Image (cartoon, rainbow, N blue to C red):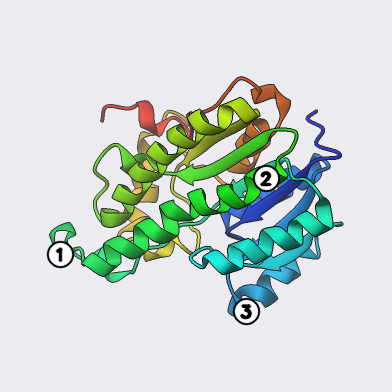
Amino acid sequence: MINLAGKTAVIFGLANKRSIAWGIAQKLHEAGATLAICYQNERMKAEAEDLIHDLSGATGFQCDVSNDREIESLFAAIGEKYAKIDILVHAVAYAPVEDLRGEFLNTSREGFRIAHDVSVYSLIAVSRGAVPLMTEGGSIITLTYYAAEKVVPHYNVMALAKAALESAVRYLAYELGPRNIRVNAISAGPIKTLAARGVGALGDMLKSHAERSPLRRNVDQLEVGGAALYLASDLSSAVTGEILYVDCGYNIMGY
């Protein structure tokens, strides 16, 4: 059994009980990690806090990852409370709905900017805040999707953002390796999260994955959480810069 007692994890992206961040939080909590859970804004606070209460010892923090001042303030508060952190989970992605459901050709300049700012640059920004507190090394984990590699209709500008995110993982892994900080991404199959509902034809994606994946089903949040637990632990001590697929094998199929 993996034991994370004495480890502190900062988790970004908790919105509700369908969030992948919630599945990860549960698994890290079960393994004994102390959790700092970050939600986006006041509107999401109530639901997030209800979930956080179910994780004994966890503390909630508000932080908009598109705001550098809020990120700075957050890590100042986390440093004061915990002194050091060991695990950073970045489960954040967003693009305007109109840029996900329309034709890719009509992607707006602003939609492109927002998707890359919130979904990609935020990983760099929160990593920059976390690294000074990772005094004993650590693990940074983000979430990607197969559309970074292959065309998934309706994923549109978010697919480009995920491709950029995967590249950012490799560059961060290279730069942070000498500090014994590992950086990896989990490529999860489609899950009915709040963010995923913005993608057109989500039902078709779920159906296709369930029919074509070797395991003939879809993945759930706790299974993604299990993979994150592995990446957060010493069992993955030599793994960095990688994309770990947790999609019931869908990515290996040709058709």
> Which amino acid type corresponds to the residue marked 2 in the rendered image?
Pro
Q: Is residue 240 toward the left or the right of residue 202 in the image?
A: right
Label 3 with label 1: CB-CB less than 8 Å:
no
Q: Residue furthest top?
A: 238
Return the residue at label 1: 106
Q: Is residue 64 something one can see in this rendering?
A: no
Q: Label 3, secondary structure: give it.
A: helix
Judging depth in this view, the residue of 36 and 200 nearest the camera is 36
Judging depth in this view, the residue of 12 and 135 nearest the camera is 135
State the CA–CA distance, disc 3 to disc 1: 33 Å
State the CA–CA distance, disc 2 to disc 1: 41 Å
Residue at left 39%, top 33%? 250
Residue at left 31%, top 62%? 113
Q: Is residue 7 toward the left or the right of residue 65 in the image?
A: right
Packing grade of label 3 (10 A; few <14, some 14-19, many >=20) is few
> Which amino acid type corresponds to the residue marked 1 in the rendered image?
Asn
Circle number at residue 131? none
State the CA–CA distance, disc 2 to disc 3: 27 Å
Q: Is residue 177 something one can see in this rendering?
A: yes
Packing grade of label 1 (10 A; few <14, some 14-19, many >=20) is few
Q: Is residue 48 toward the left or the right of residue 190 in the image?
A: right
Q: Position of residue 233 (x, y in %)?
A: 71, 31
Return the residue at label 2: 132
Return the residue at label 3: 42
Label 2 with label 3: CB-CB less than 8 Å:
no
Residue at left 61%, top 56%? 12
